[in-house]
Amino acid sequence: MKNIRNFCIIAHIDHGKSTLADRLLSFTGAVTQREEQAQLLDNMDLERERGITIKSHAIQMNYTHEGEDYILNLIDTPGHVDFSYEVSRSIAACEGALLIVDAAQSIQAQTISNLYLALENDLEIIPILNKVDLPSANPEEVTDDIVDLLGCDFEDVIHASGKTGFGVDNILKAIIDKVPAPIGNPEAPLKALIFDSVYNSYRGVETYFRIIDGSIKKGQKIKFMATGKDYFADEVGTLNLKQTPKQEIKTGDVGYLITGIKTASEVKVGDTITSLINPTESKIEGFENVKPMVYAGIYPVDTEDYEELRASMEKLQLNDASLVFAPESSAALGFGFRCGFLGMLHMEIIQERLEREFDMTVITTVPNVSYFAYTKKNPDVQILVNNPTDLPDPSSMDRVEEPYIKASIITKSDFVGQVMGLCIEKRGEIVNQTYLTPQRVELIFDMPLAEIVFDFYDRLKTVSKGYASFDYYPIGMRTSKLVKVDILLNGDSVDALSALLHADNAYHIGKKMCEKLKELIPRQQFDIPIQAAIGAKIISRETTKALRKDVTAKCYGGDISRKRKLLEKQKKGKKRMRQVGNVEIPQEAFMAVLKLN
Ligand code: GDP
Ligand code: MG
């Protein structure tokens, strides 16, 4: 136990966490040259393509230092706010954290939020100035920023480059010297923290855990305390590049467990594993059921694919327990599912996985956050509104509450004005403004979640020319003025295009939606009126004019290959379209409300 070190790497996104992790693995020989591949830990195709770590993983390294053999368990953490709960559980499984700061970018919002999480868990922090090889690096200034943030000495900050491998030996030494060995009672009943799980279609769910007390043996009967279910530990082992089965995993160590569980939702990150026969008295604190932040409808493009879509969603949920869904129906789109996601990135990932892994073509409707509504008749009864059509009639409604978040934004002082302007436009209220250095400011806002889950981050990047970082956490529900804006196409209300908007913005956004839909809805043989309405009141109107000529007429009849290409292009474009009445609605139209700027 005294030669085990459990650590994680925390950083703002793109500061080089995955690259440095790869370096540590190759330096310690955990990965041979042949196995080496850029960003080894990001092993889902999607993660690789998007360059982000979606799920956290753990890996064990062996390292000899001054004649002693050490076991180093690296627990990788996801870098996107959508997955922040997983970050917090990974951190809880460690005694130390490498805090990576990009030598050109300096401290950013997630550097600070992750650092706070690490400090709350009493982790030893090893500050690392990364990317020192960059010509744009500012090593002195950024080291000063780190010293200010941590209150450490200038000499404590390790200079490194994940790209060249510079400083990796110093990092390993610091892990051994500074990160405390695990403490825990090997004689006590088993108590282990689940910090991650991965679905494997052959082996069932693989549970990743860190043992706090006791040990876990192959074949033992174990119990998950939050779910109350018990299982046989069919296989336990350590996480090397490949899984290595063992007879027993002891106090302080990190490992995996296979019990034949076939549904991801049975394994909850943050839950405590104990022995069925000799259980621990208290479970590990801080367990949360992860709640979705954003809801949207997912419908098959072809109504006949509904059952297949259900089967695909069920399979997806088996390996992504954070996806929730329930059947719903729409007058416009027929049968589909209302789905809950951790955020917009999660929603995009689910849509992409449905298409790639299950060959489904789906329409995703306007996303919204989840509201509480109360009627005059029963002002104490909370009505959960995850879908615009669930909002009670305005005349019968007492009030609506919407979720709020506390947002932390770090930017250069030059952009404070623009960033504030954006936050105020998004109904933010400033809570605090702190100069971290004369050039860098942290702004704290209370804001409605609805305003930031959609296009906020892109707007923020634009107004700050890329010099702003952003993080947030939920702070509860607040009363709000909310209205439902309906869209009518050709005189018929299309429920799947309805949006819940703040009353002050409803007219303006309703008008812009009509303009945008006019651009997006393909012209047909007849005029298509596009209207926005609040209740019975029409607030805006546009018309998509009838198409006069056959599109292929443009090709002057002569060039057949060009004609075929055009037809193929049309066919492809058609894939993500839904026929509603006699109007064709493309996928982009459902996202139009999010892209009005
Ligand atoms: P993560 O989001 O923190 O995991 O960051 P990545 O490891 O994916 O790195 C983000 C980008 O920075 C990638 O394009 C890397 O190639 C690059 N990068 C990472 N470390 C270094 C470094 O030490 N020097 C330079 N020049 N680039 C780096
Ligand atoms: Mg990464």
Image (cartoon, rainbow, N blue to C red):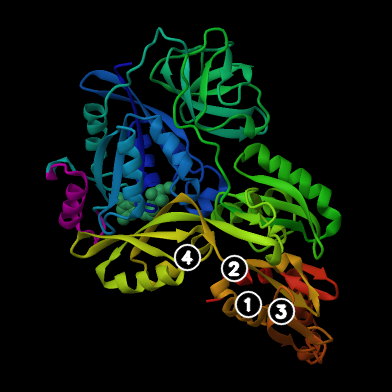
Q: Percent x, y for residue 288?
A: 51, 35
Region in magenta = 133-154
- Name which of mark 3 and mark 4 comes first in the sequence: 4
Q: CA distance from mark 2 to mark 1?
A: 9 Å
Residue 578 lies, in percent from the top left, at 78, 67
| Residue 470 visible at all | yes
Magenta stretch: includes residue 196: no
Are the residues tagged 2 and 1 within 8 Å (C-beta)?
Answer: yes
Give the CA distance from mark 3 to mark 4: 30 Å
- Label 3 secondary element: strand
* Circle 3 Cα neighbour tier, 10 Å, few/some/many (<14 / 14–19 / ≥20): few
Q: Which numbered mark, 2 or 3, is in the foreground of this view?
A: 3
Q: Quadrant of residue 33?
A: top left
Name the foreground residue: 136 vs 92: 92
Residue 38 visible, this orientation: no
Rounded to the nearest angstrom, the CA distance separating label 4 from label 2 is 15 Å
Q: From the image, tell me which residue sits under label 3.
A: 537
**Residue labelled with disc 4:** 456
